[in-house]
Amino acid sequence: MIQIGVWDNIGNVLLGVRLRTQYGNEWLKYLKPDDPAALESAPVFEELFADYETQVHEFNTLTELEAVIADLDFLVVHKERIPPEVLAKGKKLRLIQHLGLDYRGVPMEAARTRGVPVCATPLINYIVVAEHAWAMLLNHYKKMHAQRLHMLQRAYVERGWGATIPGVYIVEGRTLGLLGFGEIARPMARYAHAFGMSIIYWDVMRFPELEAEYHLEYVEWDDLFKRADALSVHIPIKPETEKIIGAREISLMQSDALFINTARGKLVDQPALVEALQNRRIGGAALDVMYEEPLPIDDPLHSLHEDLSYNVHLTSHSAWQGPWTWVHDSLNIWLNVLAQLRGEPLRYQVG
């Protein structure tokens, strides 16, 4: 019996290989438009491991993990912290598989000491969020909403054909501020560097080894808000981070700065943000997440979104793309576990 432990309080590790068994074929209507061979392309866990006898243990706490880690052959983790002394009890471990490239919670030295390989697979779910945030940034600086309206209204008949849209800016040379430098912020940094932007970041943990790789400058909390032309939020929501971005932080921002949030709406004092936008104290906002979701139909953000002069861009918590991201994330993990079982090369090995 192969013993597998899963510590993932978000649920991405197994979700993509349980869609059919947990939710029935109802999910096929979401999968098939993107891939007609949805059943074949999205196998469930039991199909993947049909040749093996497995037992999967799912944990919500470190205490639960510690109780069985001595019996585990595989440990799959997503955004959790494993103390070295707990990992040392995993004497049978053959692989530690982390979902996401930000594997700061895995004690690498303890894994090396025990000779246990560690793999960190990229989170497709988070990459598509980064792409969405970047699209919102470009939409803002290139005024794509105004460009579309210009064409729909045939406004070029009066204004003339060509560069007649006001407020279009060059992205190169501007400064992107990243609030947090985890799984979504890292591709954002790559995109920004490719476009010739300067990149600054703040995180509860500094990453000196990544600063040269991603062309970053670490700054203090207040300086991030003061210096960023576009500030993108990438920190987790916890009781201590609710409304961590308040009126004081927003007041530090430049008058033409863009505020981007694809993380969680409850990180922001939304009335303070709305007030700053209404009074044009910042240059605009691109929000995929709101404090209350779904956004109430009479929320003032709607009015700001509908008046193009406020430069407010809203989407409905749709940046994560769709069920295929869950499938790809789960498959990346479990195909690696299968590779280890079959003696095949591992992918995404780190450390």
Image (cartoon, grey):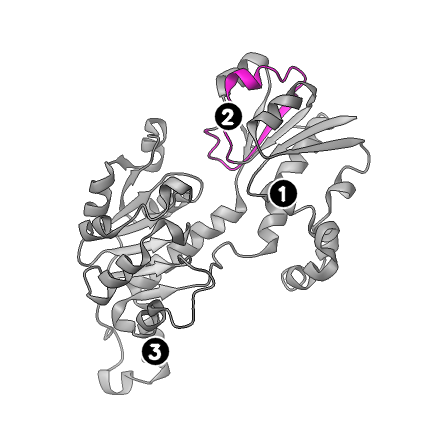
- Residues under labels 1 and 2: Cα distance? 19 Å
Q: Main secondary structure of the magenta part?
A: loop
Dot 3 or dot 1: first in sequence order is: 3
Most distant residue in the top direction: 113
- Residues under labels 3 and 2: Cα distance? 49 Å
Q: Is residue 336 above or below residue 278?
A: above
Does residue 97 belong to the magenta stretch?
yes
Task: Write the start and end of the magenta stretch as one range.
Answer: 79-104
Identify the residue at image location x=24%, y=82%: 160
Kindly identify the amino acid type of the residue bearing the numbered disc 1. Ser
Give the numbered dot on residue 149: 3
Rendered location of residue 126, percent (x, y): 48, 47
- Residues under labels 3 and 1: Cα distance? 41 Å
Dot 3 or dot 2: first in sequence order is: 2
Most distant residue in the bottom direction: 157
Give the secondary structure at mark 3: helix
Q: In this view of the protein, which residue sits in the foreground, 215 or 267? A: 267
Give the secondary structure at mark 1: helix
